[in-house]
Image (cartoon, grey):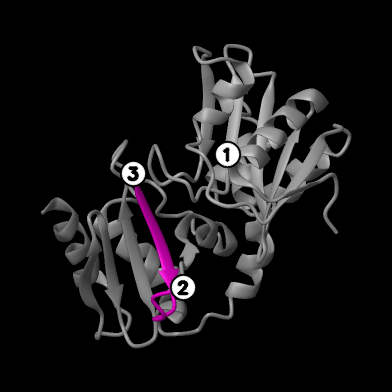
């Protein structure tokens, strides 16, 4: 009931086209769909989070993640309480009215940046709060990506590429394979739920120092290509071979 009410409040505050209709897709997933665009709301079962995507009317279109969209346009003024329905509608009205009215020209830039955005964001968010890169992230300044990449160019990472994998094992199995079944680890990623098999982003680090780190990120969609990287060569290889064994695909040490 709360979820439907939340989406309905967003709908009432939208100033874009008036033909949006609320539709329940599945448990915890709702669409606001019009003839030219669609807003997807996915309420996470664990942790109470909310994922929002803007998509074309095509049901097969997963859409563009609101967080990355906000970085691309610098939507920072209303970031506080940005998950409240009225504030969310204010963001959509101010920054994305053209998108909601069917202008998807931002998609080319989204696709270009999106390949590395979430994996880099997971790493950058572990910097101190006052780090200049963290400040830019909080202000939705997309230039943080260039700054972060420049800072890390001198750090040598080992990378492996898994081409065409099938469904992945639950994300938590990877750190347990790397550091043992009772390890204490930090993680982040885009797994929609605990046992999901379609995740493509994962950050895993061994606590408490978090110096042993493995990152899995998507570098291509068709075919699906996952990059498994670490500054520890043996750790990267161990993670890559585990994913290949569990998910299949072809393991390579480079991707053009």
Q: Residue at x 58, y 74 (%)?
A: 106
Q: Which residue does the numbered mark 1 point to in the structure image?
A: 202
- Identify the residue at horizontal 61%, vertical 66% (top origin): 110
Task: Kindly report the distance in space between the C-alpha atoms of the residues bearing marks 3 and 1.
Answer: 17 Å
Which residue sits at x=54%, y=44%? 168
The location of residue 124, given as percent across then percent down, is: 64, 36
Q: 182 or 82: which is nearer to us?
A: 182
Q: Position of residue 85 (x, y in %)?
A: 25, 57
In the picture of the structure, the residue carrying the numbered disc 2 is 61
SS class of the residue under badge 2?
Answer: loop
> Which sits in the foreground, 212 or 132?
212
Circle 3 crowding by C-alpha within 10 Å: few under 14, some 14–19, many from 20? few
Q: Earlier in the sequence, mark 1 or mark 2?
A: 2
Q: Earlier in the sequence, mark 3 or mark 1?
A: 3
Element at label 1 = strand
SS of the residue at dot 3?
Answer: loop
Task: Give the extent of the magenta segment.
Answer: 50-61
Relative vertical location of residue 17 with respect to residue 230 in this rendering, above or below: below
N-terminal label among 3 and 2: 3
Q: In the depicted view, which residue is nearer to us: 133 or 118?
A: 118
Left or right relative to 144: residue 72: left
Q: For the residues marked 1 and 2, what is the alpha-carbon distance in whole angstroms?
A: 23 Å
Question: Which disc, if any, is residue 8?
Answer: none
- Which picture quadrant has residue 177? top right
Distance from disc 3 to disc 2, alpha carbons, whole Å, reads 21 Å
Out of 143 and 100, give the one closest to the viewer. Answer: 100
Q: x, y (%) of residue 208? A: 58, 11
């Amino acid at each position: 009931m709360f979820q439907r009410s939340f989406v309905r409040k967003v709908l009432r505050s939208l100033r874009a086209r008036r033909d949006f209709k609320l539709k329940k897709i599945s448990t915890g997933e709702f669409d606001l769909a019009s003839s030219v665009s669609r807003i997807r709301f996915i309420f996470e079962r664990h942790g109470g989070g909310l994922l929002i995507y803007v998509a074309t009317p095509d049901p097969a279109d997963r859409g563009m993640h609101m967080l990355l969209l906000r970085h691309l346009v610098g939507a920072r003024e209303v970031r506080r309480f940005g998950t409240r329905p009225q504030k969310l509608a204010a963001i959509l009205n101010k920054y994305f009215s053209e998108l909601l009215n069917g202008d998807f020209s931002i998609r080319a830039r989204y696709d270009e940046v999106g390949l590395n955005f979430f994996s880099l964001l997971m790493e950058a968010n572990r910097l101190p709060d006052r780090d200049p890169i963290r400040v830019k992230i909080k202000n939705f300044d997309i230039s943080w990506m260039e700054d972060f990449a420049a800072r890390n160019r001198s750090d040598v990472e080992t990378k492996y590429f898994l081409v065409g994998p099938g469904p992945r094992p639950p994300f938590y199995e990877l750190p347990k394979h790397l550091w043992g079944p009772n390890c204490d680890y930090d993680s982040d990623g885009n797994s929609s739920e605990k046992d999901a098999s379609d995740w493509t982003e994962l950050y895993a680090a061994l606590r408490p120092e978090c110096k042993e780190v493995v990152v899995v990120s998507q570098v291509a969609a068709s075919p699906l290509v996952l990059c498994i990287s670490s500054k520890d060569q043996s750790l990267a290889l161990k993670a890559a071979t585990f994913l290949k064994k569990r998910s299949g695909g072809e393991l390579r040490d480079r991707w053009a």
